[in-house]
Amino acid sequence: GAGVSQSPRYKVAKRGQDVALRCDPISGHVSLFWYQQALGQGPEFLTYFQNEAQLDKSGLPSDRFFAERPEGSVSTLKIQRTQQEDSAVYLCASSLGQGEHQPQHFGDGTRLSIL
Amino acid sequence: KNQVEQSPQSLIILEGKNCTLQCNYTVSPFSNLRWYKQDTGRGPVSLTIMTFSENTKSNGRYTATLDADTKQSSLHITASQLSDSASYICVVSATGGGNKLTFGTGTQLKVEL
């Protein structure tokens, strides 16, 4: 595909369950970002990968959140022991290079609802 | 803490009219400012990117301005169309931040007949 693909588009889980969200970036894009977007708010940075290296995870809200990109392409965001405040849209973005002026291309997100 | 504030929070205009959205930021040291359009249920789509030395940039009917001295930006939409109905988000990047973006909360624009 030409764009960033995220799956699933919607995920409903019971409080306490673990969830895994997948991001397929644009082929060849070096940088990959995860964001969390609460209802009516702008996205907030979670973590950043350059190839397989996680260079910044300062935005992850707790140690229940874990992200990986083992082969430098597909990335997975895992949330353990989910809580209701984890309900949000999780957006993935990728950029071709690592420069500060690189445009970021976003997927349509995974809408996570915790019951 | 780096912050981006936008106004108005929401706006309703008639099709064919123009409008201007505002953005103030405190991100420092400044690297670049972007405007994104986000349709309901979709990811943000980039409209413009401006660096410190640029004070205006256009993309079709969208024109963004930047005043790095006052740390303000605006997005002007001309001859609005129904498809312009969306959230418009101002996003700022800091130098040395590794392309980490700080987002505003957006202006929700509705274009009506």
Image (cartoon, rainbow, N blue to C red):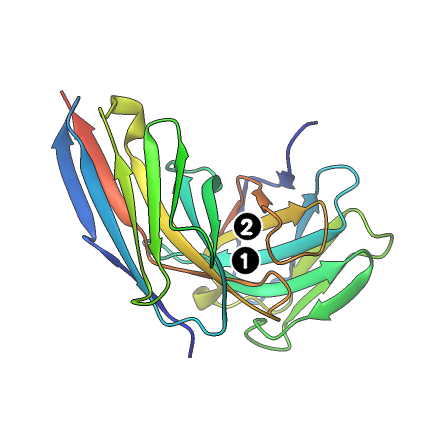
Could you tell me which residue is drawn at 18 percent across and 52 percent down?
B8
Please identify the residue farthest to the front as the structure is shown. Answer: B53
The chain under label 1 reads: A
Question: Residue B34's spot in the image, x, y percent?
Answer: 45, 50
Instruction: Give the side of residue A87 with respect to residue A102, left or right.
Output: left
Q: In this view, does A108 lie above or below A72?
A: above
Q: Say if mark 1 contacts mark 2, CB within 8 Å.
A: yes
Report the quarter where the N terminus of chain B lies: bottom left
Would you say residue A114 is visible in this rendering?
Answer: no
Give the quarter of the image for residue B109: top left
Which mark, residue A91?
2
| Front residue of A75 and B54 | B54
| Front residue of B20 and B54 | B54
Could you tell me which residue is drawn at 59 percent across and 47 percent down?
A104
Q: Is residue B29 above or below residue B5?
A: below
Could you tell me which residue is drawn at 54 percent across and 58 percent down?
A35
Instruction: Give the side of residue A71 with respect to residue A67, left or right.
Output: right
Give the quarter of the image for residue B26: bottom left
Give the quarter of the image for residue A80: bottom right
| Front residue of A69 and B83 | B83
Question: Residue B10's spot in the image, x, y percent?
Answer: 19, 47
Of callouts 1 and 2, the N-terminal one:
1
* Mark pair 1, 2: CA separation: 5 Å
**Amino acid under label 1?**
Tyr
Question: Residue A50's spot in the image, x, y percent?
Answer: 76, 59
Question: Residue B106's spot in the image, x, y percent?
Answer: 32, 52
Which mark, residue A35?
1
Q: Is mark 2 on a helix, strand or loop?
A: strand
The chain under label 2 reads: A
Instruction: Give the side of residue B78 with respect to residue B30, left or right.
Output: left
